[in-house]
Amino acid sequence: MKSKQPLRTRQLAAIHGCKRTLQLDDATYRDLLERVGGVRSAADLSPAGRARVLEEFRRLGAGAAGLMRNAVPAVTTAPNVQAGNEALIGKVGALLADSGRSWNYAHGMARRMFGRQRLEWLRHDELHRLVMALQIDANRRRKRALEAATP
């Protein structure tokens, strides 16, 4: 269920929640904002800057608390996606979100598997094979988690 708050508000709330989760003091928090987003206040962040700061918080481990669940927009397809590939791109987005990986991971897979620089440039059959590879990885991670949880 999508929140009724604007995306900017959700992202700023997630940024401040991550600050609390990581227990950052004000100076450290502002240094992080300046290093990642180029500003000293979250209110001054551009949309791309907010995304970079949230990604940095994910990298630091604050995303696991579920604070960012509503802070990222729903998966949307780029205008240059071939007709018929929208559903597969959405599946890639869901698998990436489930594994906590960024879109750059999928672009890297496209490069390694098919020699294409961007995920959107894959043919339908190539995109299908990439989805299968991500699903196999998800199944392996799920199996390892179950084995680790079993005494």
Image (tube, rainbow, N blue to C red):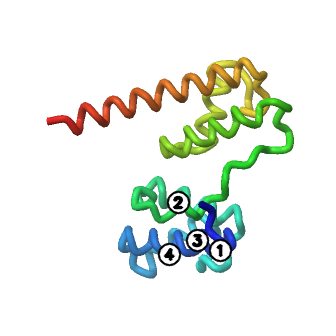
Residue to which mark 3 is pinned: 34
Residue to which mark 2 is pinned: 69
Q: Quadrant of residue 8?
A: bottom right
Residue at screen point 80% across, 44% down? 78
In 3D space, how far apart are the residues under numbered discs 4 and 3 (Cα atoms)? Answer: 15 Å
Task: Please state which of the two labelled residues, at mark 2 or mark 4, is closer to the viewer.
Answer: 2
Element carrying mark 4: helix
Element carrying mark 2: loop
Task: Please state which of the two labelled residues, at mark 3 or mark 2, is closer to the viewer.
Answer: 2
Q: Earlier in the sequence, mark 2 or mark 4?
A: 4
Q: Quadrant of residue 145?
A: top left
- Labels 4 & 1 near each other (Cβ < 8 A): no
- Labels 2 & 1 near each other (Cβ < 8 A): no
In 3D space, how far apart are the residues under numbered discs 1 and 3 (Cα atoms)? Answer: 26 Å
Neighbour tally class for label 2: few under 14, some 14-19, many 20 plus, Cα within 10 Å: some
- Labels 1 & 3 near each other (Cβ < 8 A): no
Residue to which mark 1 is pinned: 5
Q: Quadrant of the N terminus?
A: bottom right
* Kind of residue indicated by mark 3: Glu
Which label belongs to residue 31? Answer: none
Which x, y percent locates residue 141? Answer: 39, 32
Q: Earlier in the sequence, mark 4 or mark 1?
A: 1
Which x, y percent locates residue 79? Answer: 85, 44
Residue at screen point 57% across, 23% down? 132
- Of 24 and 129, nearer the camera is 129
Q: Earlier in the sequence, mark 3 or mark 2?
A: 3
Residue to which mark 4 is pinned: 16
Task: Please state which of the two labelled residues, at mark 4 or mark 3, is closer to the viewer.
Answer: 4
* Kind of residue indicated by mark 1: Gln
